[in-house]
Image (spheres, grey):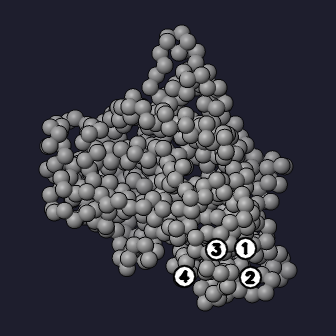
Amino acid sequence: MFIFFFLLLSLGFFVFSSSTTTTTCHRDHQPPSYPFIGCLVSFYRNRHQLLNWYTDLLSQSPTQTIIVQRLGARRTIVTANPANVEYMLKSNFTNFPKGRPFTEILGDLLGCGIFNVDGELWSMQRKLASHEFSAKSLREFTVKTLQQEVDDRLIPMLEEAAESRRVLDFQDILRRFAFDVVCKVSLGTDPFCLDHSQPLPPLVKAFDAASEISAMRGMAPVFLVWKIKRLLNIGSEKKLKESVNLVHESVMEIIRNKKENNSVNGDEGGDLLSRLLSAGHGEQVARDMAISFIMAGRDTTSAAMTWLFWLLSQNEAVEREIVDEVKQVIDKNNIGRARALDFEALKEMNFLKACLCESMRLYPPVAWDSKHAAAYDVLPDGTPVRKGDRVTYMPYGMGRMETLWGKDRLEFKPDRWLDDLGEEWENRVLKPVSPYKFPVFQAGPRVCLGKEMAFIQMKYVVGSVLRRFEIKPVSGNQPVFVPLLTGHMIGGLKVLVRKRINE
């Protein structure tokens, strides 16, 4: 009995309270709580469904905000209130940096990259990245890379699977595809992940391991455990160190080879790394920024597309509308059957974009994100914030709030993103939706620089695949959403591929 009680204590003590415009607790909006251990029992019972548990608590709170307290961790405020999100990400941005508790978790892997720093270092990298992402040449390079990867690798693979009726893990396929693309665009190197005849490159395996272990740090009930393991260099922390070293050394080797080749041939290349080096930035800055962009651009787009393909398999009428839109856009822009979609055609696919937004509303690539208060504050809903508090906004929960999306919030309905201007596809206009209501790309000064590039990539892949193939899951079971650094589908998405008739 003592050992069991000790194990429970090691998980931490959770005390939840719903916030109102004062500090008064509304006990009917919190799980059962007990002296000393708080609501630890409820937490332990819900440890395998924390996302849905948090979402239920938030939906019951009058302000869609709860306060979480546990022994060995910082006081945490979790919110699904758009006014609070806007205050954190924009209105009082300077008081809500990522903070050291967050940057420690990813610091070994991301170093001083843009997604893991605050203050002047962040501001400098933000200006640099903003300049590069706004360049027309980088956009053109990205679209060209997409065309090559889709036409030369993805489509032939799907054609072979359709002919042989081979079951594919479509989540794995999309992750491999995304890693190829993001490495080409960020590093100017090709890992050939979609080539199933070859084993995955060590860089890919190391990146996967480092990402997963770093994510588990953030989910650890007691942070002290992983810090001790790191100090002693044992267990998962030993594996993390080895994986991070391999990632860093691999990228540094690419950097040095690129610098040597550029100095000999005078060829700067169109990838992001070449641009950073040609602008005179140091090797470590270039390395950390490149790794950050790989992290951001790989699993997010593949996760969003995986969930969309599954949702479309459950909503054939919506899939048919996407196919029709792609065909109409191709006909309008005089793109031949064998030719790839171009940038201008992709911009016109508003219904497909609405489907992507609706998919990410229900299954956001990043389920939650946290900041840490630099000083005492009060959120717009009246919740007091102490210096050092962790303040978390939750896109997963926000997508399921009836107050934000209505009684049909759990349904996949892309039309909620469109103005009703008639049935003609040319008249479909996307509604303006506040990024603080739909913060899947963050918002404010830290809004994702690659947002539009991500939509272009996802539109290109989904449009190119659906115009040629039907993607049919082999299981009728509801897949399970699991949040690590990015949300993924546990067990993958096993599918059969069929050639579309009258494509």
| Residue, disc 1 | 69
Q: Residue furthest bottom?
A: 28
Number of marks drawn: 4
Give whichever of discs 3 and 2 has the lower sequence position.
2
Which element type, helix, strand or loop, lies under badge 4?
Answer: loop
Work out whether 104 lies above or below 479. above
List x then y, in percent, for residue 285.
Answer: 64, 32
| Residue, disc 3 | 383
Give how far apart the Cα atoms at labels 2 and 4 are: 21 Å
Give how far apart the Cα atoms at labels 4 and 3 are: 12 Å
Give how far apart the Cα atoms at labels 1 and 4 are: 19 Å
Q: Are marks 3 and 2 in contact (CB under 8 Å)?
A: no
Q: Residue furthest top?
A: 264
Q: Amino acid at mark 2?
A: Gly
Work out whether 463 lies above or below 311. above
Residue at left offset 16%, top offset 63%: 422
Residue at left offset 29%, top offset 45%: 347
Mark on residue 38?
A: 2
Q: Nearer the viewer, mark 3 or mark 1?
A: 3
Q: Amino acid at mark 4?
A: Pro
Give how far apart the Cα atoms at labels 3 and 2 are: 20 Å
Mark on residue 29?
A: none
